[in-house]
Amino acid sequence: MSLEDGLWARTINMILGGWLFVSAFVWNHSAIERVNVAYVGSLIFVSSLLAVSKTRARYMTGLLAVWLLISTVLLPHFDATTQWNSVLVAVTVFTLSFVGPPYHRKRGLMLRTAHRPSRAA
């Protein structure tokens, strides 16, 4: 797992999705908030897992983070701690959804130009 491939970011997002799911049942949430956090947490986990092989799945992870942030602000909640937890997870997941592998096309262009024969006159 290198820093360049983005796998570390997918792993952290899977952990955060799992944590979000668990926190829905461990911490005090309103009924609708509990359902929302549990579903979004499990979907973040799955989309992060898919993003390991399908890099475009990162966009779904980012959209889920945006939904989590918006729904956290709009839905009723019992405790500010659960609200802050959801906000921090949403911001972190959203930020990490931008981390991806280097573009192969650019790497291919660099390889082609590096192997081009020189035109010495």
Image (cartoon, rainbow, N blue to C red):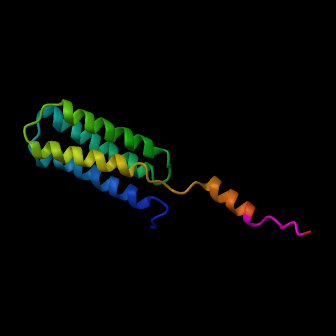
Residue 12 placed where, x, y %? 33, 57
- Which residue is found at the position 50% from the left and 53% from the top? 53
| Residue positioned most to the bottom | 120
Q: Quadrant of residue 65?
A: top left
The answer to whether residue 30 is left or right of residue 68 is: left
Q: For the N terminus, which image quadrant?
A: bottom left
Residue 10 placed where, x, y %? 39, 55
> How many marks can you see?
0
- Which residue is found at the position 80% from the left and 64% from the top? 116
Residue range in magenta is 114-120
Q: Is residue 35 magenta?
A: no
The answer to whether residue 49 is left or right of residue 114 is: left
Q: Is residue 69 above or below residue 53?
A: above
Residue 83 placed where, x, y %? 15, 42
Q: Is residue 87 above or below residue 6?
A: above
Residue 87 placed where, x, y %? 22, 44
- Which residue is found at the position 73% from the left and 66% from the top? 114
Q: Main secondary structure of the magenta part?
A: loop
Q: For the C terminus, which image quadrant?
A: bottom right
| Residue positioned most to the right | 121
Q: Nearer the viewer, residue 65 or 21?
A: 65
| Residue positioned most to the front | 121
The answer to whether residue 10 is left or right of residue 88 is: right
The answer to whether residue 105 is left or right of residue 73 is: right
Q: Is residue 42 above or below residue 111?
A: above
